[in-house]
Image (cartoon, rainbow, N blue to C red):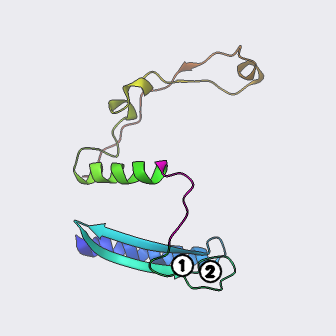
Amino acid sequence: MWQNLLQTGRHSVRALHSEVVAGRLPGAVLAVARRGHLVLHEVVGYLGPDQGTPMPLDAIFAIASMTKPIVGVAALMLREEGRLGLADPVERYLPQLGNRRVAKLSDQVLSGEGQSRPLRPSVRSRSRT
């Protein structure tokens, strides 16, 4: 199991390196922990687009909004504990999203006169546990 995790992490490092080489990303730090142990900690690229300073392992990044990383980590923790299935419908956890509606974008909809229809039930696929 650890070998698969390390292989996936190394694949991610190669993908990040490709982004640096292509000029789409100055650099990145990848850290993967499993059951309280740091199993992968790698750097690629530079601190900035000027490519003057190599990326250090202990780089500090400014993040404008912490909502997405916190929710992402929480979801991964729930998945790891078996309490969240990747194919679960969102309304199982957020019932207020159970009656979603959708409208085809048109001038009528933009003017507030268009009609919406119920969204099809959530797509369910076989969960791989």
Which residue extends farthest top? Answer: 113
List x then y, in percent, for residue 65: 53, 51
Q: Is residue 127 left or right of residue 113?
A: left
List x then y, in percent, for residue 80: 25, 54
Task: Confirm whether the magenta stretch covers residue 49.
Answer: no
Residue 128 seen: no
Q: Residue at x 34, y 76 (%)?
A: 40
The image quadrant where one finds the N terminus is bottom left
Q: Which residues are magenta?
A: 60-67
Q: Residue at x 54, y 59 (%)?
A: 63
Q: Is residue 75 left or right of residue 119?
A: left
Residue 100 seen: yes
Q: Is residue 126 above or below residue 43?
A: above
**Of 34 and 89, which appears nearest the observer?**
34
Q: Look at the numbered discs 2 and 1 and tell me whether their residues touch, using CB distance below 8 Å.
A: yes
Q: Is residue 125 above or below residue 52?
A: above
Return the residue at label 2. 21
Question: Badge 2: few (under 14), some or many (20 or more) residues near its Cα, within 10 Å?
Answer: some
Q: Residue at x 67, y 75 (%)?
A: 23
Secondary structure of the residue carrying numbered label 1: helix
**Of 45 and 63, which appears nearest the observer?**
63
Return the residue at label 1. 17
Task: Name the main secondary structure of what is drawn in magenta.
Answer: loop
Q: Is residue 78 above or below residue 33?
A: above
In space, the residues marked 2 and 1 are separated at their CA atoms by 6 Å
